[in-house]
Image: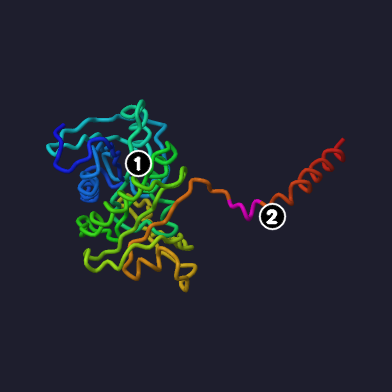
Amino acid sequence: MQVEKGQDTNRVILVTNDDGYKSSGMEALIEMVKPLGRVVVVAPEEGNSGMSHAITIKVPLRMKHRNRDDNVELYTVNGTPVDCVKLAMNELFAKIPPDLMVSGINHGSNASISVVYSGTIAAAIEGCLYGIPSVGFSILDYGEYPDFRASILYGREILKNVMEKGISPECCLNVNIPVLPPQEIKGVKVARQNRGSWREEFEKRTDPRGVNYYWLTGYFHNDEPEATDTDEYFLTKGYITVVPVNVDFTDYREMKKLQGWENDLYNAVKNELSQAK
């Protein structure tokens, strides 16, 4: 592998996504990280949007090396984004882990509750489970060829800060970029995840054989439209948002409340068992 001018060869960056290795978002992400180190891509053969943290257990996984002419090491996997990270860590980085793991650039927003469904962010979460500083990038454009200029420029600076200053263990970053040219971006805001939900609707259709089938549609419902400190709010104002995502799903406030149930639950069952004798 030849070294490109300005490239830091001491750092290794693992790259993946959920839109498939041929997506324009993947190419933009590669352009973003190339100056930061040696790039190793392990990405799905096909799109895996909405797969969240799914892993493949019913069919064999296959990893193929594919040739590129731009000094990028590329492998494809017939599985999910999380499969890609797991295979990369067990096959390519079993002895020495990469310095950074990046996922994206996803075609479409992963703000608010979308983080739960996102294969892009799931891959970043899997990266931090291996102890690697990990970042997932998404642009608020579902088109095939968005304008990635702002994503590349700002994303590269975000990654530089991650590598130089670090992020907490068991934490990754969820970065969303509005659909604006670089000169119109208002800035970068570290924000919290907006509370909201997808209200699913299923469009019922009938195939030529008379069998019903369904297409998933729906819309996003913002549960706190008046909030001014969330990712959704800042994105509508033209800011890039950075949300720290922790792998610990525990609700500590609710835990204290539920601990008050412990004795009641135990005593209720104990009483029922004594009466059954």
Quadrant the C terminus occupies: top right
In the picture, the quarter occupied by the N terminus is top left
Q: Residue at x 36, y 60 (%)?
A: 241
Compared across the picture, whether 102 is left or right of 2 comes to right
Pointer 2: what residue? 257
Dominant secondary structure of the magenta stretch? helix
Q: Residue placed at 79% from the left, 42% from the top?
A: 269
Identify the mark at residue 179; answer none if there is no mark. Answer: none
Q: Earlier in the sequence, mark 2 or mark 1?
A: 1
For marks 2 and 1, give the one nearer the viewer.
2
Q: Nearer the viewer, residue 154 or 165?
A: 165
| Viewer-nearest residue: 241 or 260 | 241
Q: Position of residue 152 (x, y in %)?
A: 23, 54
- Percent across and percent down for residue 48 are 33, 45
Identify the residue position indicated by label 1 in the image.
81
Asked whether, in this view, residue 108 is left or right of residue 274, the answer is left
Give left or right: position of 273 versus 185. Answer: right
In magenta, the rendered stretch is: 251-255
Q: Quadrant of residue 150?
A: bottom left
| Left or right: 182 as drawn, with respect to 275 | left
Q: Secondary structure at mark 1?
A: helix
